[in-house]
Every structure is written in structure tokens, then in C-alpha cells.
Amino acid sequence: MSGGNRERAESPPNGPFDPVAFLEDAVQIPSHESVEEMRAFVVETLDRFGVESEVVAGGCVIAEKASPRPDAGPHLVANTHLDTVTPHVPFERGAAREDETASGTAGTETAIRGRGACDAKGPLAALLAGFLAAEPERGRLTLALTPDEEVLSLGAAALTGLSPGTEDRLDGDLYLVGEPTGLDACTAAKGRFQGTVELSGVAAHAAEFAGANAVAAAEGALAAIRTFDEEADPHPQLGPPKLTPTVIEGGEATNQVPADCAITVDRRSVPPESAEEFRSSLAATVREAVPESVDTEVALTDRESPFFEAFATDPDHELVATVAEAARAAAKSSGLPAERGGAVRPFGAATEASYFAPAPTVVFGPGDLADEAGAVAHAEREYVRVREVEAAAAAVGKTIAALLGDVETEGQTRTEA
């Protein structure tokens, strides 16, 4: 649906920001191939509420609110992304269906459906509501929106100084990252690396006892992959790492000893493992498991931005406690089920939160990656409940007020990261 055909539900020009009305408009804007229209909509919204913004660093949107005492409190960054996955799913608003609510209240809940409803335009609406309502009394507040989290995260990499020739434009003390968490405060997430194990032998006629069979050597390589984490200690929040062979290719002719074989692997890491540490360790392990007649090489997949490495924030950190408490209070005020919102747990997917570590970071927002009926985010049934969007907006507002509001001790220094 093109922007010109959207049915506008936006907040009145002089009224308070309505996160649900914003979300209704936002879901109707396709942003799976380009975020230009979505970015313009956000910039227009900020301008309409008197907030100047800037498009920087690979298409990111930055807006700031300073306090009268910027050095007396933390620099809090609220971040999420503008893009969605393909294809676009049309907008729909209506009574929640049976598979869209676990509380048994189908027909009494209202849901917004469509691509981006929960990943991550619902969280974006909540962050915008909190940002626009904020009046920091100390510290600083920055809204940072990135354009390509679902692809390569080039915008976030440039924004944080992780791309060559760029500088960290954020330098935050605390980060609140918008993703669908069911209103829980998510403190950690596994990283995701991708690499290739290349085996190189010597081609020969299959009838001869000659050559070095690279495909046969894959048996040892796969065994090394399968047992790679046997001695790994589980992370206290994320559990054990995971290594999965996903694609294998080798051989050119059915009557030839194959000279080459390649195995693609997917790595879900836990702290403190880095991408290079994983690569070098796997390379050594595979080398020991493969015959000397076959050469081995392990390489990370080329990409223009850094891989998402695992991150973990101390569950006892002030940021975590503040978000969780605000979420519980907002969920209760919104009449959500008692078990909905405010838990402290890991997040189920890799995110750009990785780029903000080791600064304390919490992932938070309305909606779910998946529910009891199956996938929600990235699926054709993507939805978010209206009451959760409203509760998330209230929770973000409470969090900002608690972290950047006045304190009894004058001259309090910035919260240590």
C-alpha cells in the first residue's frame, strides 16, 4: 500500500502523541525494501512535536533532549530499527483472534496486524512516546533509529564507530533497545557468526587408490563440529553456545575423488567469545580431526559490518531493575494478565544491542517473537495487542523519568557503565 493511499490515524497536530495512532500509520508504510518513506514519517512526526532531528551515519535518525544538568546524570540512548523483512504484510486492526491472546480474552482485546507491527514498529511507537514526553532534569536522552538491522546493520555500525572511518556518535552510558519482548526486560542475547570450513584434497580417478578425498574428510570435520562445545561452560544467562552445520558442498564428478568440500556453519555465541576467537578455535579443532593429506581453512563469512556478538548486562543493574519495575506497573495499570511483562530474561534473537555492549543494555518492547501458535515476528500473522503498545509506552516514560529525573544528591555523577 503506497503512502498516498494510507488512511491517516495520526495524533492531532496540537494534541499529545498517540503511540497507537502512530503505529497504525507506520505499519501501512512498506519498509522492507527501502526505509526512506518510513524515515521521513518519523522525522515529520518529531518535527510536528517540536523536536529537531538529524539523518546521519548511513541513514540513521538522531534526536536529542538535553537537561539543565547534562553531566549530573547518565546519557540514556533509546534505539530501534526502521526496516522490516520482506515481503510487506497489509495493515489490519480488529478484535484479537483466539491465536493472538494467551489470556483467553479473544474478542475483548484489540490487535494491530501487519509487517512491522511488533518487529519493530510497535517498540518504535513506545520509544517515541517516552522520548517525546520526556523532560530530563539531569543527564541526556538520545533517540537513535537505524535503517537496516534486518540486513547488515551498516547504519548502526557507522553510528557506533564500528565501521572503518566512522566515529561513535552515541557514546551512551545506558541503552534501551526496542524489540518485541512481551514487555519483559531482556538483559542478554547470543551472538551470531557465520563461517565456512574449507577442506582441500587432491583429485584422482575414483577407481584408483590415489588422491586425497575432501568429502571423506568431512566426516572428521563434522565430528569436530558436533563435539566442539563439549567442554564449554554454560553462560549464567544464556546457557551453552551452539554450533550448527547448515550447508555442505563438495565434489564435481561421480567418478572422481573430490578435491574440495565446504561446510557452512552457524554459530550462536555466548560471552566472552568474539568472532575471531571462535574462528581460530574451530580452525584448530578441525585441523586435528582431519587427515594430514587434506588441507583445512576456517574463514568467517565476508560482511561489511561486524557480526552480532553476544552481550550480557548484569541482571542486578539499575537499568534492568528500572525497566522491569516500570513494565510491571504499566502492565498492571493496563489490565494485562499478572504474568505478562516485567520478567528479567535473555532475548531470543541477535540484535544491534550487540554493538552497544559493554554499556548496560536492556532490550524491551511490546509483542512477541513467537507465541503458543507459532512465529509472530517475520511471519504473515505478525501482530501486537494495542494494550501492550500503550503499556510499553508508559513503561518507557516511567523508565526515562526514573533514570533522568531529579535526585536528592546534587551533582550526582554519570552512572558508571
Image (cartoon, rainbow, N blue to C red):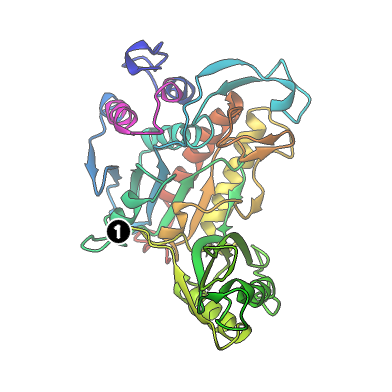
Q: Is residue 88 magenta?
A: no
Q: Residue at x 70, y 20 (%)?
A: 97
Give the overall secondary structure of the magenta segment: helix
Where residue 7 appears, x then y in whole percent? 41, 10
Q: Is residue 185 above or below residue 307?
A: above
In the image, is residue 35 part of the stretch drawn in magenta? yes
Q: Residue 104 falls in which quadrant of the image?
A: top right
On-image quarter of the N terminus: top left
- Residue 323, position in %: x, y? 55, 48
Give the x, y percent position of residue 220: 65, 77
Q: How many marks?
A: 1
Point out the residue furthest to the front here: 207
Q: Can you see residue 139?
A: no
**Residue appearing at x 52%, y 29% in the figure:** 117
Judge by depth and name the residue closer to the eye, 287 or 326: 287
Residue lying farthest to the bottom in this orientation: 292
Compared to 66, does 108 lie above or below? Answer: above
Q: Is residue 105 visible?
A: yes
- From this view, report whether residue 406 is shown above or below residue 96: below
Q: Amino acid at mark 1?
A: Asp
Between 141 and 232, the residue placed more toward the observer is 232
In-front residue for pair 348/170: 348
Which secondary structure lies at badge 1?
helix
Locate residue 98 relative to residue 309 in the image: left or right. Answer: right
What segment carries the magenta color? 25-45
Q: Position of residue 136 (x, y in %)?
A: 36, 44
* Mark 1 surroundings within 10 Å by alpha-carbon count, few (fewer than 14), some (14 through 19), many (20 or more): some
Residue for badge 1: 71
Q: Give the quadrant of residue 286.
A: bottom right
